[in-house]
Image (cartoon, rainbow, N blue to C red):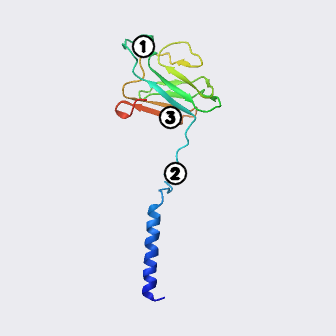
């Protein structure tokens, strides 16, 4: 093979390698031991529906306070121990769970005072927590963020 033919062959092969590399999905190491396209592990405990704006007149009554709530859902078939888990907002309000959540079930966390049961728990607050622009953040017992949901200017209402 002539010198010119080898150069042309080398150039074609190099071009093909560049095109092939560009066509591959970005899966490079980001320096944290994970690839860009690797999804984060999703928890089986997630935030569900959120009622941040109490229906009716916001008069500060316990009924109105309990009209705002956040749902926490266990998507697994197994029950989950939520003792020590927290639900918080951007204003620093934090509710600490003291319950075990059955598999494939949900619990509503109300703002006001009330009797807790398997489907509803109460923060026992006398003032509103969830503003019209806020973020609900669910953390596990070690303080790791498990899920969050924003609404208002920062995100969409759930």
- The part of the image, by quadrant, that contains residue 16 is bottom left
Q: Is residue 54 above or below residue 23?
A: above
**Which residue is pictured at 45% across the width and 61% down the height?**
23
Frontmost residue, 64 versus 6: 6
- The part of the image, by quadrant, that contains residue 59 is top left
Q: Which residue is mark 1?
A: 64
**Which residue is pictured at 65% across the width and 31% down the height?**
78
Disc 2 + disc 1, Cβ < 8 Å: no
**Which residue is pictured at 49% across the width and 88% down the height?**
1
Q: Which residue is mark 3?
A: 147
Extreme residue toward the left, this view: 153
Q: Are there few (<14), some (14-19), or many (20+) residues within 10 Å of tag 2?
A: few
**Which residue is pictured at 47% across the width and 65% down the height?**
20
- Of labels 3 and 1, earlier in sequence is 1
Answer with left or right where residue 79 lies relative to residue 66.
right
Q: Is residue 30 above or below residue 66?
A: below
Name the secondary structure under disc 3: strand
Disc 3 + disc 1, Cβ < 8 Å: no
Frontmost residue, 10 versus 95: 10
Q: Which residue is mark 2?
A: 32
Q: Are there few (<14), some (14-19), or many (20+) residues within 10 Å of tag 1?
A: some
- Of labels 3 and 2, earlier in sequence is 2
Name the secondary structure under disc 2: loop
Q: Are there few (<14), some (14-19), or many (20+) residues within 10 Å of tag 3?
A: some
Q: Nearer the viewer, mark 3 or mark 2?
A: 3
Residue 104 image position (x, y, % from top left): 60, 28
Q: Is residue 63 above or below residue 13?
A: above
């Amino acid at each position: 093979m002539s010198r010119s033919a080898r150069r042309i062959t080398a150039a074609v092969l190099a071009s093909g390698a560049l095109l092939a590399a560009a066509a591959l999905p970005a899966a490079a190491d980001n320096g944290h031991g994970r690839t860009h396209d690797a999804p984060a592990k999703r928890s089986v405990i997630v935030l569900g529906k959120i009622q941040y704006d109490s229906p009716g007149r916001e008069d500060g009554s316990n009924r109105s306070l309990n009209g705002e709530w956040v749902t926490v859902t266990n998507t697994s078939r197994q029950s989950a121990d939520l003792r020590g888990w927290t639900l918080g907002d951007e204003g620093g309000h934090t509710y600490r769970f003291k319950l075990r959540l059955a598999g494939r079930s949900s619990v509503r966390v109300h703002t006001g005072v009330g009797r807790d049961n398997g489907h509803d728990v109460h923060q026992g607050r006398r003032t509103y927590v969830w503003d019209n622009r806020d973020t609900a953040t669910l953390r596990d017992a070690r303080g790791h963020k498990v899920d969050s949901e924003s609404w208002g200017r920062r995100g969409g209402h759930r």
